Amino acid sequence: MNLPTKITFSRIIATVILIVTLFVLSLIPNLSTPELGNSRINLVFLIVFVFFVIASYTDHLDGKLARKNNQVTDLGKFLDPVADKLLVSSMLIFLCAPSIFAHYAYEQTAFIPVWCVIIMVARDTVVDALRFIAAQKGVVIAANIFGKLKTVLQMVAIGAVLLNDFPFHYMYPNNTNPYLTVTMFIVYAATLASLLSGIIYVWQNRKAFLESK
């Protein structure tokens, strides 16, 4: 196992540990974790944010090292998307209902609507299935600009939700509508980019669904 693959595998293990830790915390009754001053950022969510940033960077780093050192392997190709989907999908699901999964964060108001999570997770599932079918026929589906934009917006949206709309909430101190925030508009943008990129992927590669003659 080369270095890029070890980095990818470590990201999977770390993500699993994070998910288990958050699940255990959700089971502790009457648990309350501190907020950072008047920022409304919960300490646990800040730790998760730091982990998410580091994990997102290693997602870029392992691919860069693999290509630079000519260490691209089949195992790495398999583990990298698994690590990426595990990290992003788990964060999307966790943040769609923080009041349930993170009852200890009393000041947490930012979240990702369930319908947005469904669209983004479904899009990734469809595109992954399309890539698998195409690969069986020897066709490589390259990432398009909308797919890259979707990835960037998803990461920014997850980060903004983890920070509970910080520092944007200072712009509208009297706003009580959680659907009308800068963070929520970023979430909407990520959802739209996800939907559009999925439609474009399917349309441009629709022949992959057809049987080869």
Image (cartoon, helix red, strand yellow):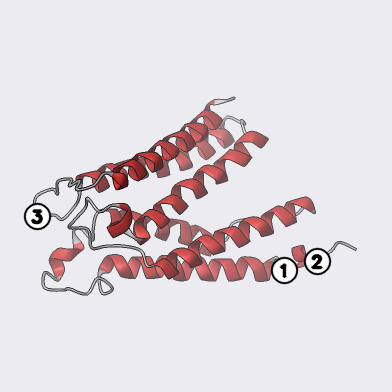
Give the image quarter of residue 40.
Answer: bottom left
Residue name at image x 30 percent, y 47 percent: 26
Of labels 3 and 1, earlier in sequence is: 3
> x, y (%) of residue 77?
62, 40
> x, y (%) of residue 66?
57, 34
Q: Secondary structure at mark 1?
A: helix
Residue name at image x 57 percent, y 61 percent: 144
Q: Depth check: 138 or 48 in front? A: 48
Checking the image for residue 206, the label placed there is 1
| Residue under pointer 3 | 38
Q: Viewed as shown, does residue 73 lie left or right of 49?
A: right
Residue name at image x 40 percent, y 69 percent: 189
For the residues labelled 2 and 1, the Cα–Cα distance comes to 8 Å
Report the number of numbered marks: 3
The amino acid pointed to by label 1 is Arg
Residue 141 visible in image: no
Report the mark closest to the observer, 3 or 1. Answer: 3
Q: Secondary structure at mark 2?
A: loop
Quarter the C terminus occupies:
bottom right
Q: Viewed as shown, does residue 59 lie left or right of 109?
A: right
- Asked if marks 2 and 1 touch (Cβ < 8 Å), the reply is yes
Quarter the N terminus occupies:
top right
Residue name at image x 47 percent, y 42 percent: 59
Give the image quarter of residue 139.
Answer: bottom right
For the residues labelled 3 and 1, the Cα–Cα distance comes to 51 Å
Q: Viewed as shown, does residue 138 lie left or right of 118?
A: right
> x, y (%) of residue 123?
55, 63
